[in-house]
Amino acid sequence: MASQINKKMLWTLLVFLLLSNMEQRCFAEKGKRQQVPCLFVFGDSLSDDGNNNNLVTLAKSNYPPYGIDFPKGPTGRFTNGRTMVDFIAKFLGFDHYIPPFATARGRKILKGVNYASGAAGIRNETGQNDGDRISMDRQLKNHQITLLEIKQMLGNHKKSTAEYLSKCVYVVAIGSNDYLNNYFSTQYPTSTIYTPQQYAVALNDQLSQQLTSLYKYGARKFAVFGLGAIGNIPIVRSACGSGTNGSACIEYINNAAELFNVGLKSQVVAFNYNLTCGSFIFINSTGIGLTSPLLASLVSNVSCCETFTTGLCVPFGSTCSNRSQYAFYDSVHPTQIVASVYARRAYKAQYPSDAYPFDISHLAQH
């Protein structure tokens, strides 16, 4: 048994070192040329890099041990190091992190802004029990503020602004909280109003309107992320319990999220048909998670850091030393190594199922 464990640990270490080397090479290669003028990010805590820091909310991560592997320490990223969008920005050739809207100032916004907010959802009421958060609708309003500033910087020429924005990539990764902090929370009546299928349709209809608004503002290159297997995260596993009933509970939650994913991919198909000036791609987060040997080798049933019942790390609490062997940093959010896998395959698909109709590297050139 000990021999088997040692072999597994050795295999995990070798894979991690190989991926780290590949990542450094990729960063060095892509850093030579920025492939798009700007990157705009919309989403939740998986992408948040500091927008919640000054909000009155429980959804905060600007304290140790968050950021333990990040050069600047705790910044408001809900992980030990970089987020998925940090890696995507690097793969696209950006030599800096995309700043959060909360602190983005001056000409830096010409290279993009991150509007993502922990606990945020597609629906405005999602996450309200955690306190303040910046819903997708509010993120769109913040983006309009940015656009006014960009227009002024480009000389108030509508054509120049439109041409500039048409070359930028827009990452949209949101919806997990609409399930975890809304539909499957006993503090909301949502599950008594909608069946899982009806809720998936309602969410997709609202997100479709939000994406259409972005298109009207000038966005043309969209990378829209589907939900991962949210039933598998530690806080949900713990709530579902063990045994047969626990497995059924987890499967029920994952199936509900997959209904949303199926609808979202269909929306992407419809957008590409109806909004002919735009390019929309769907990133299959669940598929990526299920087909990664590295992710399968990681500890995934418990968190790396000591956590509250909310799933977030205890301030200055203990954390595991072997973070590259854990899938989750707290009981909700992935570790940096997991974020790098999702970003890499979203940027450059390993399998045809990773991205539809193509990946982010092709979107940038499209």
Image (tube, rainbow, N blue to C red):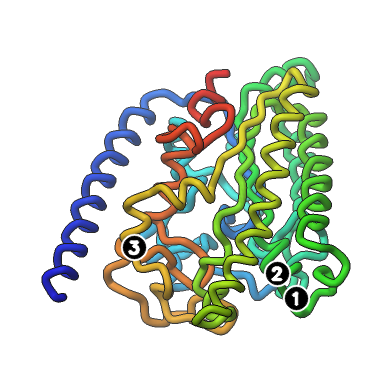
Please tell me how crowded label 2 is: few (under 14), some (14-19), or many (20+) other residues with Cα within 10 Å.
many
Q: What residue type is labelled 2?
A: Asn
- Frontmost residue, 11 versus 90: 11
As helix, strand or loop, the secondary structure at mark 1 comes to helix
Q: What mark, if any, has residue 298 been given in the picture?
A: 3
**Residue 33: x and y, percent?**
41, 23
Q: Which amino acid does label 3 sit on?
A: Leu
> Earlier along the polypeptide chain: callout 1 or callout 3?
1
Residue occupying the point 82% across, 29% down? 216
Q: Which of marks 1 and 2 is nearer the N terminus?
A: 1
Residue named by callout 1? 129
Res. 72 image quadrant: bottom left
Q: Can you see residue 155?
A: no
Q: How far apart are marks 1 and 2 (CA)?
A: 8 Å
Residue that badge 2 annotates: 181
> Which residue is located at x 64 percent, y 53 percent?
258
Residue 293 left/right relative to 73: left
Please, what secondary structure does the residue beneath circle 3 have? loop
Amino acid at the residue labelled 1: Asn
Marks 3 and 2 sit apart, C-alpha to C-alpha, by 26 Å
* Residue 87 in view, yes or no: yes
Quadrant of the rendering where the C terminus is positioned: top right
| C-beta proximity under 8 Å, tags 1 and 2 | yes
* Rendered view: 325 above or below 245: above
